[in-house]
Image (tube, grey):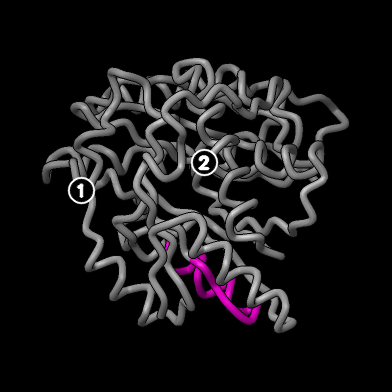
Amino acid sequence: MEIFRTVQDMQNFATAAIRAGKKVALVPTMGFLHEGHLSLIDIAREHADLVVVSIFVNPTQFAPNEDLDKYPRDFQRDKDLCELRGAAAIFAPEASEMYAENQTTWVYEEKLSTKLCGKSRPIHFRGVCTVVSKLFNIVRPDVAVFGQKDAQQALIIRRMVRDLNFPIEIIVAPLVRDKNNLALSSRNKYLDENQQKDALVLSRSIFAAKEAILSVGIGEIPSICEVVKTEIAKFHGIVDYVECLDSETLEEPTEATKELLLAVAAKFGTTRLIDNILINLE
């Protein structure tokens, strides 16, 4: 497995792969890999000859008051896991390699990114779209794999690819949970034992909300979301949002809506967690 630290070396590898007729898949990550990330590598291998995993804690998607400096990192462990899962290369640049000191060019998505996480993290998706655009230009993948856990991010990346005509297939892989149904996240490392137990309310409450919506209909979504908020608060969660929206547009659902995205974000202690579930109405 190759490890690249510079844009030029990564681009040289990508160019050689393309010239050799190889299909390349990209799995973008911020490292500290867990089974959710590894499932993305597995799916990427099914769709390409070579899988490149990027490991880059992207500073431009963190606000000044967020956890950039303490975001968990363990490159040697990540390297070993990528090798075990059959990745062909890791691209792990420093921030100075990815961003010029006086960079003034950014990539925005102006509609989907204003919803859900975008309300409390207004610069977040500008950073995501910019770094993913850069990775697409550097790795030149045919396929890129993202996780459903970051449902809004995946939707925004799909829109960006469509609107900017990137010749890349976007695959959204299923959300992976632990044995207790907690959505896997690198930030779960921050939770103490009690907070891990409390955080299980996220999956438990959205699973119950799904059944309630399917039973009583979309007209009761506001009251069902309030129940979810109350339930999270019972377990010491500080709710950022609980929303149930059209999964394609992130607008309020209508009778024409075919699928819902029920998404939650809450803090347990100082750790912000997200979770979601898709609800098929057809």
Disc 2 is placed on an element classified as strand
Residue drawn at (45%, 20%) of the image: 121
Residue drawn at (23%, 47%) of the image: 72
93 above or below 270? below
Residue 168 is inside the magenta segment: no
Q: Give the range drawn in magenta.
A: 37-52
Q: Residue beneath label 1, please?
A: 189
Residue drawn at (38%, 70%) of the image: 3
Q: Position of residue 185 (x, y in %)?
A: 35, 49
Residue drawn at (25%, 41%) of the image: 71
For the stretch drawn in magenta, the main secondary structure is helix
Type of amino acid at the residue the image marks with label 1? Lys
Pick the front one: 118 or 31: 31
Q: Where is residue 157 in the image (x, y as percent from the top left)?
A: 66, 42
Count the numbered circles shown.
2
Q: Residue beneath label 2, please?
A: 276
Disc 1 is placed on an element classified as helix
